[in-house]
Image (cartoon, rainbow, N blue to C red):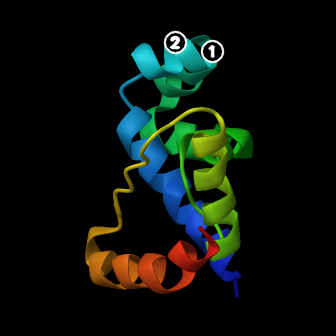
Amino acid sequence: MQTGGVAARESAKATLAFYKQHGSNALTDVYGISDELNALVDPGGYDALLAGMPDQWVDDLTIAGTPEECAAKIKGFYAAGADSVALFPVATDRVDDIVRLTADEVMPWL
C-alpha cells in the first residue's frame, strides 16, 4: 500500500501527464523540458509520457505529497516572491476530500 505522499504524487503525475500529453507549451519552454517532453509524447502519447516522466517534474510542477510537504512547497513560492498561491484540486472524484484535507492538514503548517 502506498503512503499518502506517494499516492498523492502518483495521482499528480497522472494528471500532469494528461495535461502535457499534447506536447510542449510556454510553461515547458520556461521550465526547460520542451524537447524532453516532446521526445516522450511524440512516439507514445499519454502512456509513454506517464511511464517516462521524471519524478522531478512532478515535484517542480505540482503541489502534491504529505500535508507538510505541500505546505513547504507553498512556503517556497512565497519565499520566491509570490504574493498568492492558488490550489486546484484536480482529482474530480475527490474534490471535497482534498479541500477538507488541505484546510485541516496543510493550512495549519502555513
Residue at 66% of width from left, 46% of height from top? Answer: 76
Mark carried by residue 108: none
Towards the viewer: 86 or 42:
86
Location of mark 1 (residue): 32
Q: In this view, does 36 lie to the left or right of 102?
A: right
Where residue 16 appears, as percent x and y from the top left, is 47, 45
Which quadrant would residue 110 be assigned to in this image? bottom right
Residue at 35% of width from left, 63% of height from top? Answer: 89
Instruction: Look at the numbered disc 2 and give the secondary structure of its residue.
Output: helix
Residue at 37% of width from left, 39% of height from top? Answer: 19
Residue type at mark 2: give it.
Answer: Asp
Where residue 106 appears, as percent x and y from the top left, is 55, 74
User: Does 14 appear above or below 77?
Assistant: below
Tell me, yes or no, whether the two marked residues, 2 and 1, touch with CB atoms within 8 Å.
Answer: yes
Location of mark 2 (residue): 29
Where residue 62 appears, as percent x and y from the top left, is 54, 48
Residue type at mark 1: give it.
Answer: Gly
Q: In this view, does 74 lie to the left or right of 69?
A: left
Spatial distance from mark 2 to mark 1, Cα to Cα? 5 Å
Give the quadrant of the N terminus: bottom right
Where residue 95 appears, as percent x and y from the top left, is 29, 75
Towards the viewer: 46 or 70:
70
